[in-house]
Amino acid sequence: MHVTLLTTLLLTLQVLALALPSYTHTSKRLPSSSLHPRQNATNPSSCDLSSISQPPHTMTPPSSDMTLVLIALGRGTQNYTCAPNAPTPSPIGAVATLYDASCAVATSNAKPADGKGRAGGRGRAKGPCVLPQSAPSIGNHFFSDNTTPVFSIPSLGITALKKAESAPAPDPSVDVPWLLLSAVAEGTTSPVKSIYRLHTKGGVAPGSCEGVAEGETVTVGYEAEYWIYA
Ligand SMILES: *[C@@H]1O[C@H](CO)[C@@H](O)[C@H](O)[C@H]1NC(C)=O
Ligand SMILES: *[C@@H]1O[C@H](CO)[C@@H](O)[C@H](O)[C@H]1NC(C)=O
């Protein structure tokens, strides 16, 4: 009788001892909180960008894991210089002030009711959206070296990028190419992954270096929409 009880007790203890480690193994970390607050926090715009489509172009479209968080209008200059004896100017970067164009594009981008063709109602070759001159600035675009465009937008952080792809603008003799820029880790504090430069207006270099002094910076005014994905 006593022996049976003792055996039962020992067996129970053994089972418990065996079971204990598996409790610690099966206890899992709680799933991290939903992504929505973070996505919301990265979107400084009050307009819904979820159904906006890019104008047609030949570059790789944004991947499905990316979210359009902001469309910025840039107004500034593309800068060029002439190396000694060079026939044509070469690019040395750009500077631009950025404005929130999300709502302007969202309102003009609505698809026709029949949903057929003509994605984006706005004229495709008509250049960037129009904002009032008095629109408040949301940040700046500049280059940290000749090949590294930077976007500093306080509501998003700083994004340093490299040119990944380009496509000629509809009027390439006047308007700088459309671009796909990919974020690089060095210098980036924002969650931004890609920026498309679309609907460019102006900015093309003069055709020749004639009359340009050595070391002189040639600045050409331009505007563009920057479609920013995180
Ligand atoms: C996004 O943030 C704004 C302001 O912080 C808030 O009013 C809004 O409800 C949020 N939207 C979502 C979908 O969480
Ligand atoms: C480009 O030109 C602007 C003047 O429009 C100037 O402020 C800026 O420093 C120049 N940047 C470069 C990289 O040359």
Image: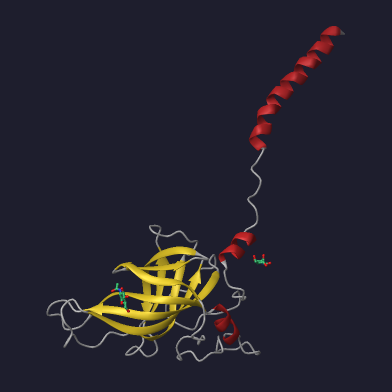
Q: Nearer the viewer, residue 16 or 65?
A: 65
**In the rendered image, is residue 90 in sight?**
no
Q: Nearer the viewer, residue 195 or 132?
A: 132
**Residue 159 x %, y %:** 43, 64
What colouring method underlies this structural image? secondary structure
What residue appears at the point 59 percent right and 75 percent down from the top-left corner?
Answer: 49
**In the rendered image, is residue 55 in sight?**
yes
Q: How many marks?
A: 0
**Residue 199 x %, y %:** 44, 84
Q: Residue furthest right?
A: 1
Quadrant holding the N terminus: top right
**Residue 165 x %, y %:** 37, 73
The answer to whether 210 is drawn above or below residue 197 in the figure is below
Q: Residue furthest left?
A: 85
The answer to whether 69 is drawn above or below residue 31 in the figure is below
**Residue 161 x %, y %:** 39, 66
What residue appears at the point 64 percent right and 34 percent down from the top-left corner?
Answer: 25
Residue 123 in the figure: left or right of residue 75 = right
Q: Residue furthest top?
A: 2
Split into quadrants, the picture shows ligand 1 in the one at: bottom right
The answer to whether 49 is drawn above or below residue 65 in the figure is below
Residue 106 in the figure: left or right of residue 160 = right
What residue appears at the point 37 percent right and 84 percent down from the top-left corner?
Answer: 222
Residue 15 in the figure: left or right of residue 206 = right
